Amino acid sequence: MKCKVCKGPAVMDIRRHNAAFCKPHFLDHFRNQVARTIKEFSMFTSDDRLLVAVSGGKDSLAVWDVLIDLGYDATGFYLDLGIGGYSTRSKEAAIAYADAKGAKLIVRSLAEEHGYTVPELAKLTRRVPCSGCGLNKRYEFNRAALEEGFDILVTGHNLDDEVATLFGNVLHWNVDMLGRQAPVLEEKVVGGATALVRKVKPLVRLAERETAAYALLTGIDYVIEECPMVEGNTQHRYKEAVALLEESSPGTKNHMYFGFLNRVRHRFGDEDENFELVPCAGCGAPAARWDAAAEPVCSFCKTKRLALGRKQQ
Amino acid sequence: MKVRLRNPDRVVDVSGPATVLDLLKELSIVPEAVLVIRDATLLTRDERLNETDEIEVRPVLSGGAS
């Protein structure tokens, strides 16, 4: 294959664009797609302080790398989930990248902050690990952004992540989740103060295969191994199913996601009108109050109380 | 040729495939779900392979909570 731009030998083909690129023109294409997404969805400006949630994997390190190269004020945040050697290697990858790039990285640990690791949390709550992991990551990313004074929380969600989530939400008709799926989740003010920092996903125009290619071609030493707790994970199965569809009909993922954003999403509200959003009695984070007489407690505090309660038994 | 596969990490011997696409078909791997690497360089699906090549097939789809 030949590069679409210079006609030299290509290293990366992107069938949904009916294009292939040599290394320099693929990297240009990748950065241009990120810059286009930031502009198209008015994600942030160069005046904003960005906190990038970094896992040590290809997506989060790639988005951090592009933001730094584009001149944004982007600090990394790594949360140690306590998943044995996998977490150790992930943390090393995040720290090594930050050191090599001269970028600032904030590191926190779930065990130190809350008294449990993800494997312990799964056992204590008797729920699948990914459920507690996702809840704790979202909570800690937001808490770190608020405490450290960041304007925007950036995540490395790519097109495949968004399509797999959409696919699952449609399969199960999670109508409330469909209303909340977007490249930008606006800041939420509860009780007069910012409770949820504005959250953005600048990689939604790029497939997972492209973020892996970007990391490899730029020499980012990311963690290739899969999380040991993810086996049989639903999101992964959806991605495999969608990859088959994309292979036979290139462009399927793009059509599904951007068709949803442009033509369908507005039909779903982003709020359930049956509850009121109030500060959590435990931590002040947003909590849904369905009943005026009930004490409002957020999902994170409920899970933490359950886990620590059982741990003490 | 030697082909390195991941998750779990292993090396298999494959002989015969003329191109990257042929190799992936033989291994029953969906091309959209992997990168194919030779000498630290990415290969497109039409790239020709040699019996002496050392190839890495790297999965790109990650799972888990988001």
Image (spheres, rainbow, N blue to C red):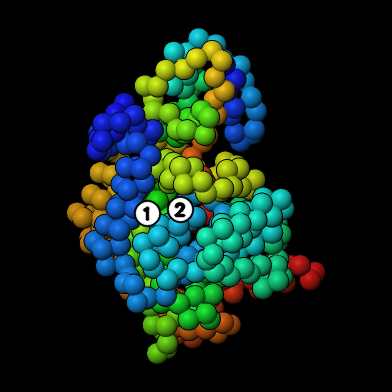
Instruction: Check the residue under mark 1 and report the chain it is in.
Output: A
Dot 1: what SS?
A: loop
Q: Residue at x 19, y 54 (%)?
A: A263
Name the residue carrying label 1.
A203
Instruction: Please give left or right for residue B33 compared with residue A180 in the image.
Output: right
Q: Position of residue A41 (x, y in %)?
A: 26, 63
Look at the numbered discs 1 and 2 and tell me whether their residues touch, using CB distance below 8 Å.
Answer: yes
Q: Position of residue A197 (x, y in %)?
A: 42, 75
Q: Relative to A269, is B21 above or below?
A: above
Q: Farthest residue in the left direction? A: A263
Q: Position of residue A15 (x, y in %)?
A: 30, 33
Q: CA distance from mark 1 to mark 2?
A: 9 Å
Name the residue carrying label 2.
A62
Instruction: Write down the quadrant of residue A271 in the picture.
Output: bottom left
Mark 2: amino acid: Ala
Q: Residue at x 48, y 81 (%)?
A: A149
